[in-house]
Image (tube, rainbow, N blue to C red):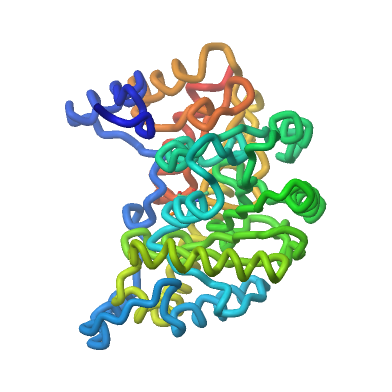
């Protein structure tokens, strides 16, 4: 009856079942997996959503790639991060997740085309690809003091069906930023093998170190850079993402023509949000500053607590909303995560959720309120150390 785009079985995994049982039983839990900024006590400016009630939105005049004022505001905002872009190269979507779907429709034929996907990285790639009928081929990031692209796995996995390489910088959950030479090596491969580069930069505003993603990664191959309000203004409920198209001029023009047709078919970005973009981006600065302060506070607390637990390593984080702990692999990650839930009342993600290369890793969000985070981390270290 149903297509193979959605998984055959929708049974929750063991950890999720335990979590549900505890929540239904009313057990108080310290949640170190929360990544919803509207749920962690961030103060939003009182009038931040007022611009959504602009009366101009009573009229509907759809523009497939997005209204020019909104695209100009995004282009100006990109300059804040040193990214130079012309407004006519900005394409609006209702979220970054939707941007992936639009790009898969642009680049991949349904009968067997593939994209290369980094691992460990954003777990939703599994669904984002399969729901669009696209095959994913993994390439690995390896940890050698920092997370870097393992180009052997990229080259070994690459075949004629590959239409694009996905790269996430800063990456979720490793918090690693691609170096200039890594981006150039990805571009060079894409250029010579007629594939596009999709560069997900949703966490670009949340630097914890001086490492910065490359600002202008060159023009060798067709490139799509992704961003969105859900991270840059802490407003996931407002639903706005964008794609910046760059690369060799004829390819950019051909891509924009086709993107216009795809976006025109759905017209998914609401008129109120487009009118509100300039105001949302400027009010979002205060939210962004608060989130940045939160992740820096929690990251400092994490490193401070870890000093008392020598067997636990807090991996370096350049940017983003999460942190990775390497803990003694005295038992499987799933067991550690379940014990943390049942005995310590703390929710963490085990590394296998993100397909880490081996055990044992735990992933924690840096967003929880500082008191919750500090107590949760103390309990994690107490239980997981050897
Ligand atoms: C790396 C990465 N890309 C994209 C997204 C999705 O963003 P959006 O809310 O704009 O769909 C997320 C969400 O956490 C993410 O971690």
Quarter location, residue 214: bottom right
Q: State whether residue 301 is above or below residue 232.
A: above
Report the residue at 56% width, 55% height from top. 296
Side of 279 relative to 214 (left or right): left
Side of 151 relative to 362 (left or right): right
- Looking at the figure, which quarter contains the C terminus? top right
Report the residue at 35% width, 18% height from top. 14
Can the viewer see residue 112?
yes
x, y (%) of residue 178?
71, 50
x, y (%) of residue 21?
23, 23
x, y (%) of residue 267?
34, 67
Report the residue at 60% width, 60% height from top. 224
> Looking at the image, which residue sits at the far left?
25
Q: State whether residue 123 is above or below residue 194.
A: above
> Looking at the image, which residue sits at the far top?
331
> Looking at the image, which residue sits at the far bottom?
56
Q: State whether residue 60 is above or below residue 174.
A: below
């Amino acid at each position: 009856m149903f297509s193979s785009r959605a998984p055959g079985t929708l049974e929750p995994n063991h950890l999720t079942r335990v979590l549900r049982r505890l929540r239904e039983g009313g057990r108080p839990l310290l949640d170190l997996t929360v990544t919803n900024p509207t749920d962690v006590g961030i103060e939003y400016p009182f009038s931040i959503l007022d611009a959504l009630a602009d009366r101009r939105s009573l009229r509907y005049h759809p523009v497939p790639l997005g209204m020019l004022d909104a695209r100009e505001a995004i282009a100006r905002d990109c300059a804040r991060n040193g990214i130079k872009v012309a407004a006519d190269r900005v394409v609006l979507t209702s979220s970054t997740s939707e941007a992936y779907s639009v790009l898969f429709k642009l680049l991949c034929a349904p009968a067997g085309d593939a994209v290369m996907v980094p691992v460990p990285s954003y777990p939703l790639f599994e669904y984002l690809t399969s729901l669009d009928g696209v095959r994913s081929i993994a390439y690995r990031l390896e940890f050698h003091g920092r997370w870097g692209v393992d180009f052997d796995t990229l080259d070994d996995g690459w075949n004629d069906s590959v239409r694009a390489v996905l790269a996430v910088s800063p990456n979720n959950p490793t918090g690693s930023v691609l170096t200039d030479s890594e981006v150039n090596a990805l571009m060079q491969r894409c250029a010579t093998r007629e594939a596009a580069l999709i560069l997900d930069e949703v966490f670009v505003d949340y630097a914890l170190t001086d490492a910065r993603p490359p600002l202008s990664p060159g023009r060798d191959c067709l490139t799509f850079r992704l961003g969105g309000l859900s991270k840059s203004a802490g407003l996931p409920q407002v639903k706005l993402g964008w794609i910046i198209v760059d690369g060799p001029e004829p390819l950019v023009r051909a891509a924009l023509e086709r993107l216009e047709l795809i976006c025109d078919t759905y017209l998914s970005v609401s008129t109120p949000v487009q009118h509100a973009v300039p105001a949302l981006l400027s009010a979002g600065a205060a939210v962004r500053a608060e989130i940045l302060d939160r992740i820096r506070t929690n990251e400092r607390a994490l490193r401070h607590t870890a000093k008392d637990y020598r067997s636990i390593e807090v991996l370096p984080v350049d940017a983003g909303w999460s942190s990775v702990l390497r803990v003694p692999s005295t038992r499987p990650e799933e067991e550690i995560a379940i014990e943390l839930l049942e005995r310590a009342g703390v929710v963490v993600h085990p590394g296998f959720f993100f397909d880490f290369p081996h055990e044992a890793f735990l992933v924690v969000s840096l967003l929880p309120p500082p008191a919750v985070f500090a107590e949760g981390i103390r309990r994690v270290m107490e239980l997981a150390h050897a």
